[in-house]
Image: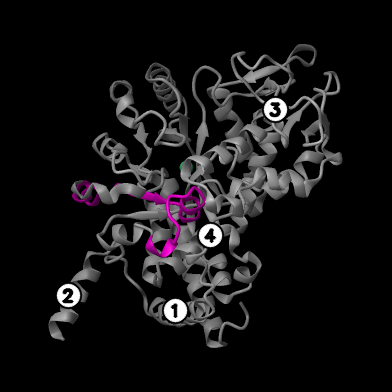
């Protein structure tokens, strides 16, 4: 028995949270949390309804939200959400209930003519399908038409669209349970095709960003890092009708970054939002050829030089398995690193890699060897334990998005998520939500709750996850210190509050 105890203790000492201290108050809360978690788990298991074993879209979110465990996570100061994408970071309910009612916003619904046609991806006017930047016109496509422009046939004013049907076209659903990853990504890409025109319209995107900031801030998330699509050749460009005589005006590169900065300044102009922060990871797309990525990487260095404190790094996003390998971009990434070194800027990499079940997807190797500061997902790292020591030594952090991993069909039962092994082996991790807009929810609570329940975390581990999200963020210097100080103060107050509520059997939660 002594050997057993010492083996267990050696095992705990390897954990990613082993060096996180707990105060007396935290230890008290840790004990209460363990009781609460165990009671929830036992009762759900005995009813054969334990959510991590079911598909996300079969969960009863209202029932989950009514549990004390969920309230506890909801009120927890969570630090940052470090893995979000432009266009899916905010509220889809806002899009279908408020966004489509904004002046000039129109929706193309199922009962409209012109199916199997194409439109320009920003101004949504009919275009040959082989024209550069043209995209399919799918039911549920949302676009802006100014009074001065003819509305493309089939589009109705937003007020005439059915919000419930539109929501179903903009979010994933229980049908994906039967899909494989490629089919799930196909569904997912259709959602982005539908919202692409309206998200390219700068005034709408500014409003969408306000909701993104707001839903996170109210969900006790103080810092966001968004992978902002911002690349050469029109990728990620925004537009409005502010040119001469209301002509179309484009925003690319610095214009895109200025849009985020303006949205942030607007949010921070409200005193109650003081303490919120945002950083950008400039992103291109893994579907593009190396020569395009080379231009994007060079542009990213220029934009980093011009915005040293707002732009924190570079990534190439999209589904990995059918698209370019990270290795395909090796020359371009190394050229970028040289450009950045010559310019004296820190161009960190945040590669979106290892989001795969495939042993032949070796992107994790390249992400780590190229010096990625964090890795988006890193799901299939279990194939490459040779990397673990380097990841531990260099604090290469995995951004784990549990609900996304399941909806995109990389895993069924979330209890068996490979992150269990990574944290047990001392790899640092943060929890994020990837594309909550497409999954039909907002904020970080649901993913954090999923991690807590699926991986049966304790308070020390929750604290490590929250702390990591600021410690390994792109925040620097004084900004990081004050963000950390705010979080520590909020965390200590939350622990005291929870201990009081635990004393009354969580009744007040
Ligand atoms: Zn992602």
Q: For the residue carrying disc 1, how many other residues have a C-alpha within 10 Å: few (<14), some (14-19), or many (20+)?
A: many
Counting residues from the start of the chain, the first of labels 2 and 1 encountered is 2
Counting residues from the start of the chain, the first of labels 4 and 2 encountered is 2
Counting residues from the start of the chain, the first of labels 1 and 4 encountered is 1
Counting residues from the start of the chain, the first of labels 4 and 3 encountered is 4
The answer to whether residue 226 is seen in the rendering is: yes
Q: Secondary structure at mark 4?
A: loop
Q: Secondary structure at mark 1?
A: helix
> Would you say the residues marked 2 and 1 are in contact, meaning their CB atoms lie under 8 Å apart?
no
CA separation in Å, label 2 and label 1: 26 Å
> Would you say the residues marked 1 and 4 are in contact, meaning their CB atoms lie under 8 Å apart?
no
Disc 3 marks which residue? 137
CA separation in Å, label 3 and label 2: 60 Å
Magenta highlight on residue 414: yes
Numbered mark located on residue 7 in the image: 2
Q: Nearer the viewer, mark 4 or mark 2?
A: 4
Residue stretch in magenta: 387-416
Q: Secondary structure at mark 3?
A: loop
Q: Nearer the viewer, residue 389 or 196?
A: 196
Numbered mark located on residue 352 in the image: none
Looking at this rendering, what residue extends furthest in the front direction? 178
The image quadrant where one finds the C terminus is bottom right
Numbered mark located on residue 55 in the image: 4
> Would you say the residues marked 4 and 3 are in contact, meaning their CB atoms lie under 8 Å apart?
no
């Amino acid at each position: 028995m002594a050997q057993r105890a010492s083996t267990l203790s050696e095992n705990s000492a390897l954990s990613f949270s082993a060096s996180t201290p707990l105060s007396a108050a935290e230890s008290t809360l840790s004990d209460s949390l363990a009781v609460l978690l165990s009671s929830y788990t036992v009762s759900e298991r005995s009813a054969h309804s334990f959510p991590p074993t079911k598909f996300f879209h079969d969960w009863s979110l209202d029932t989950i939200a009514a549990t004390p465990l969920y309230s506890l996570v909801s009120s927890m100061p969570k630090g940052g959400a470090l893995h979000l994408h432009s266009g899916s970071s905010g509220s889809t309910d806002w899009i279908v209930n408020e966004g489509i009612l904004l002046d000039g916003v129109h929706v193309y619904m199922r009962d409209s003519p012109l199916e199997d046609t194409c439109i320009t991806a920003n101004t949504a006017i009919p275009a040959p399908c082989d024209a550069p930047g043209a995209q399919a016109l799918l039911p549920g496509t949302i676009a802006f038409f100014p009074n001065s422009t003819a509305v493309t046939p089939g589009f109705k004013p937003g007020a005439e669209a059915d919000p419930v049907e539109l929501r179903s076209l903009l979010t994933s659903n229980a049908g994906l349970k039967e899909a494989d990853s490629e089919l799930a990504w196909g569904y997912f890409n259709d959602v982005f095709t539908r919202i692409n025109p309206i998200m390219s319209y700068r005034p709408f995107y500014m409003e969408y960003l306000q909701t993104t900031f707001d839903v996170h801030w109210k969900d006790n998330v103080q810092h966001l890092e968004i992978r902002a699509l911002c690349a050469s050749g029109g990728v990620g460009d925004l537009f409005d009708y502010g040119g001469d005589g209301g002509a179309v005006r484009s925003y690319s590169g610095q214009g895109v970054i200025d849009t985020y900065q303006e949205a942030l300044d607007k949010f921070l102009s409200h005193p109650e939002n003081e303490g919120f922060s945002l950083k950008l990871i400039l992103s291109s797309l893994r579907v593009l050829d190396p020569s395009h990525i080379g231009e994007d990487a060079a542009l990213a260095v220029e934009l980093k030089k011009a915005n040293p404190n707002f732009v924190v790094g570079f990534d190439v996003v999209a589904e990995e398995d059918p698209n370019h390998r990270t290795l395909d971009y090796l020359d371009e990434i190394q050229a970028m690193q040289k450009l950045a070194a010559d310019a004296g800027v820190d161009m960190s990499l945040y590669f979106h890699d290892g989001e795969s079940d495939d042993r032949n997807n070796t992107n994790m190797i390249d992400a780590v060897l190229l010096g990625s500061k964090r890795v988006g997902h890193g799901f299939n790292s279990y194939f490459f334990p040779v990397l673990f020591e380097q990841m531990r030594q260099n604090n290469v952090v995995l951004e784990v998005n549990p609900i996304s991993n399941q909806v995109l069909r990389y895993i069924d039962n979330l209890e068996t998520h490979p992150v269990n092994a990574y944290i047990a082996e001392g790899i640092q991790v943060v929890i994020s939500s990837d594309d909550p807009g497409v999954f039909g929810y907002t904020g970080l609570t649901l993913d954090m709750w999923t991690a807590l329940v699926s991986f049966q975390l304790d308070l020390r581990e929750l604290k490590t996850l929250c702390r990591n999200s600021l410690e390994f963020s792109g925040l620097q210097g004084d900004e990081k210190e004050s963000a950390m100080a705010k979080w520590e103060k909020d965390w200590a107050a939350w622990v005291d509050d929870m201990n009081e509520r635990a004393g009354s059997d969580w009744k007040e939660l």
